[in-house]
Image (cartoon, helix red, strand yellow):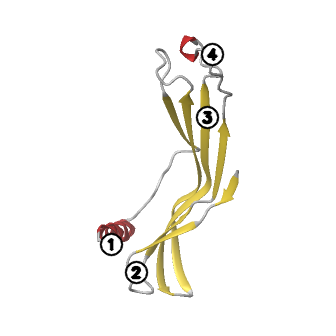
Amino acid sequence: MKINAPVLIIPENTFIPNSNYISLNVGKIILNTTLQEYDQDINYSEYTDDQGLYDEYMIALQGMCLSLCNAQNSKNVTETALIDDISITLKVQSCLSPKHEIFPTIRVNIEIERKIEMELNLMMMKKFFSITDQTCIQMER
Protein backbone atom coordinates (compact mmCIF):
# COMPACT_ATOMS: atom_id res chain seq x y z
CA MET A 1 0.00 0.00 0.00
CA LYS A 2 1.39 3.43 -0.93
CA ILE A 3 0.16 6.60 0.76
CA ASN A 4 1.17 10.19 0.16
CA ALA A 5 2.08 11.28 3.65
CA PRO A 6 1.32 14.62 5.26
CA VAL A 7 3.54 17.59 5.86
CA LEU A 8 3.77 18.23 9.59
CA ILE A 9 4.19 21.84 10.70
CA ILE A 10 5.58 22.43 14.19
CA PRO A 11 5.37 26.16 15.03
CA GLU A 12 7.57 27.93 17.55
CA ASN A 13 4.56 29.75 18.95
CA THR A 14 0.98 28.95 17.97
CA PHE A 15 -0.22 32.37 19.09
CA ILE A 16 2.11 34.40 16.84
CA PRO A 17 1.04 34.13 13.16
CA ASN A 18 4.50 34.59 11.56
CA SER A 19 6.68 32.66 14.01
CA ASN A 20 9.42 30.24 12.97
CA TYR A 21 8.43 26.63 12.38
CA ILE A 22 9.81 23.22 11.53
CA SER A 23 8.39 21.53 8.45
CA LEU A 24 8.55 17.73 8.24
CA ASN A 25 7.50 16.40 4.85
CA VAL A 26 7.12 12.68 5.41
CA GLY A 27 6.99 12.07 1.63
CA LYS A 28 5.46 8.71 0.74
CA ILE A 29 4.61 5.94 3.18
CA ILE A 30 4.80 2.42 1.80
CA LEU A 31 3.34 -0.44 3.84
CA ASN A 32 3.87 -4.09 2.97
CA THR A 33 3.30 -7.38 4.76
CA THR A 34 4.50 -10.86 3.94
CA LEU A 35 2.61 -13.37 6.03
CA GLN A 36 3.40 -17.07 6.27
CA GLU A 37 0.54 -19.53 6.26
CA TYR A 38 0.28 -20.83 9.80
CA ASP A 39 -0.43 -24.56 10.12
CA GLN A 40 -1.22 -25.72 13.67
CA ASP A 41 -0.17 -29.28 12.80
CA ILE A 42 3.45 -28.18 12.25
CA ASN A 43 5.81 -27.92 15.20
CA TYR A 44 7.64 -24.69 14.29
CA SER A 45 9.92 -24.99 17.33
CA GLU A 46 11.71 -27.87 15.57
CA TYR A 47 12.79 -25.69 12.62
CA THR A 48 16.57 -25.35 12.29
CA ASP A 49 16.30 -22.98 9.31
CA ASP A 50 14.45 -19.68 9.55
CA GLN A 51 13.06 -19.92 6.00
CA GLY A 52 9.26 -19.61 6.21
CA LEU A 53 9.37 -19.08 9.97
CA TYR A 54 8.76 -15.30 10.07
CA ASP A 55 5.93 -12.94 9.14
CA GLU A 56 7.37 -9.66 7.84
CA TYR A 57 5.98 -6.14 8.19
CA MET A 58 7.63 -3.27 6.32
CA ILE A 59 7.11 0.49 6.63
CA ALA A 60 9.11 2.76 4.31
CA LEU A 61 9.24 6.54 4.30
CA GLN A 62 10.45 7.76 0.91
CA GLY A 63 11.43 11.32 0.08
CA MET A 64 11.35 12.60 3.65
CA CYS A 65 12.51 16.22 4.20
CA LEU A 66 13.05 18.27 7.37
CA SER A 67 13.26 22.07 7.06
CA LEU A 68 13.59 25.06 9.35
CA CYS A 69 11.31 27.87 8.16
CA ASN A 70 11.44 31.55 9.02
CA ALA A 71 8.18 33.31 8.16
CA GLN A 72 8.49 37.10 8.06
CA ASN A 73 4.96 37.24 6.64
CA SER A 74 2.57 34.82 4.93
CA LYS A 75 4.10 35.49 1.48
CA ASN A 76 7.79 35.59 2.41
CA VAL A 77 9.09 32.36 3.95
CA THR A 78 12.79 31.47 4.13
CA GLU A 79 13.22 27.70 4.18
CA THR A 80 16.48 25.98 5.15
CA ALA A 81 16.66 22.26 4.42
CA LEU A 82 18.13 20.32 7.36
CA ILE A 83 17.53 16.86 5.91
CA ASP A 84 16.64 16.64 2.25
CA ASP A 85 15.08 13.76 0.34
CA ILE A 86 16.00 10.72 2.42
CA SER A 87 14.37 7.30 2.63
CA ILE A 88 14.05 5.15 5.74
CA THR A 89 12.80 1.56 5.87
CA LEU A 90 11.70 -0.29 9.01
CA LYS A 91 11.28 -4.07 8.80
CA VAL A 92 9.84 -6.06 11.67
CA GLN A 93 9.75 -9.86 11.56
CA SER A 94 7.63 -11.91 13.94
CA CYS A 95 8.41 -15.60 14.53
CA LEU A 96 5.62 -18.16 14.11
CA SER A 97 7.10 -19.94 17.14
CA PRO A 98 7.45 -17.21 19.79
CA LYS A 99 9.43 -19.42 22.20
CA HIS A 100 11.81 -20.89 19.61
CA GLU A 101 15.12 -22.01 21.16
CA ILE A 102 17.30 -20.80 18.25
CA PHE A 103 15.51 -17.87 16.61
CA PRO A 104 14.37 -14.61 18.24
CA THR A 105 10.67 -13.83 18.65
CA ILE A 106 11.04 -10.46 16.90
CA ARG A 107 13.67 -9.09 14.54
CA VAL A 108 13.90 -5.37 13.77
CA ASN A 109 15.92 -3.88 10.92
CA ILE A 110 16.17 -0.17 10.13
CA GLU A 111 17.72 0.90 6.83
CA ILE A 112 18.62 4.50 6.08
CA GLU A 113 19.32 5.17 2.43
CA ARG A 114 22.42 7.27 3.09
CA LYS A 115 24.33 8.98 5.86
CA ILE A 116 22.46 11.95 7.34
CA GLU A 117 24.54 15.11 7.49
CA MET A 118 23.41 18.54 8.65
CA GLU A 119 25.29 21.80 8.59
CA LEU A 120 23.80 24.28 11.06
CA ASN A 121 25.21 27.57 12.16
CA LEU A 122 24.67 28.70 15.73
CA MET A 123 21.63 30.87 14.87
CA MET A 124 19.87 27.98 13.07
CA MET A 125 20.57 25.64 15.99
CA LYS A 126 19.08 28.16 18.43
CA LYS A 127 15.94 28.51 16.27
CA PHE A 128 15.58 24.74 15.87
CA PHE A 129 15.94 24.03 19.60
CA SER A 130 13.73 26.98 20.52
CA ILE A 131 10.93 25.49 18.41
CA THR A 132 11.38 21.97 19.79
CA ASP A 133 11.58 23.29 23.38
CA GLN A 134 8.37 25.31 22.95
CA THR A 135 6.61 22.28 21.44
CA CYS A 136 7.60 20.08 24.40
CA ILE A 137 6.42 22.69 26.91
CA GLN A 138 3.04 23.02 25.14
CA MET A 139 2.60 19.22 25.00
CA GLU A 140 3.22 18.92 28.75
CA ARG A 141 0.36 21.27 29.59
In three-dimensional space, the C-alpha distance between marks 2 and 4, rounded to whole angstroms, equals 57 Å
The tag earlier along the polypeptide, 1 or 3, is: 3
In three-dimensional space, the C-alpha distance between marks 1 and 2, rounded to whole angstroms, equals 10 Å
Mark 2 lies on residue: 14
Question: Image quadrant of residue 113?
Answer: top right
The tag earlier along the polypeptide, 4 or 3, is: 4
Mark 1 lies on residue: 138
Please state which of the two labelled residues, at mark 4 or mark 3, is closer to the viewer: 4
Label 2, secondary structure: give it: loop
Disc 4 marks a residue whose amino acid type is Ile
In three-dimensional space, the C-alpha distance between marks 1 and 3, rounded to whole angstroms, equals 37 Å
Mark 4 lies on residue: 42
Mark 4 closeness class: few <14, some 14–19, many ≥20 residues within 10 Å: few
Question: Image quadrant of residue 64?
Answer: bottom right
Disc 1 marks a residue whose amino acid type is Gln
Please state which of the two labelled residues, at mark 1 or mark 3, is closer to the viewer: 3
Residue extending furthest right? 1
